Image (cartoon, rainbow, N blue to C red):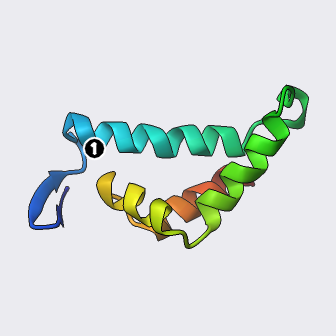
Amino acid sequence: MKSHLNSKQVDLDNPEPDTRVWRQMIEHGLKTANTSANDSHNGSLQAQQEARVWLTGEGDVFKLVCALAGMTPDKVRNETYRWAA
């Protein structure tokens, strides 16, 4: 599947290395947001809460990271809610 991002074609199935970095940032946020209470230590609970706010918010940085990852903010939010269920 291909998508256009700022007039640059992005192959969503085989992303460029820079796109992969941004996707890894989103993946890290998803993992942090869904850390179980048993795994929470050394500030992990605060990190979990911050990640959830970031992933479900409307912040400009979040929107930019999604765009650079070739994803829509809505898609990332839906994934966040799916992981949290």
How far across and down, in percent of the image, does residue 52 sit?
70, 55
Disc 1 on helix, strand or loop?
A: helix
Q: Is residue 27 above or below residue 82?
A: above
**Quarter-of-image position of residue 38:** top right
Residue drawn at 19 percent across, 39 percent down? 16
Q: In this view, does 75 lie above or below 23?
A: below
Amino acid type indicated by mark 1:
Thr
How far across and down, in percent of the image, does residue 75 sit?
47, 64
The residue closer to the viewer here, 16 or 11, is 16
Image-based side of 56 in relation to 36, left or right: left
How far across and down, in percent of the image, does residue 44 sit?
79, 34
How far across and down, in percent of the image, does residue 32 sit?
67, 39
Residue drawn at 63 percent across, 38 percent down? 31
* The N terminus - image quarter: bottom left
Image-based side of 22 in relation to 36, left or right: left
Image-based side of 47 in relation to 68, left or right: right
Residue at far bottom of view: 58
**Quarter-of-image position of residue 47:** top right
Residue at the disc numbered 1? 19
Residue drawn at 81 percent across, 44 percent down? 46
For mark 1, does the 10 Å Cα neighbourhood hold few (<14), some (14 to 19), or many (20 or more) residues?
Answer: many
* The C terminus - image quarter: bottom right
* Callout count: 1
The residue closer to the viewer here, 80 or 45, is 45
Residue at far right of view: 38
The residue closer to the viewer here, 39 or 51, is 51
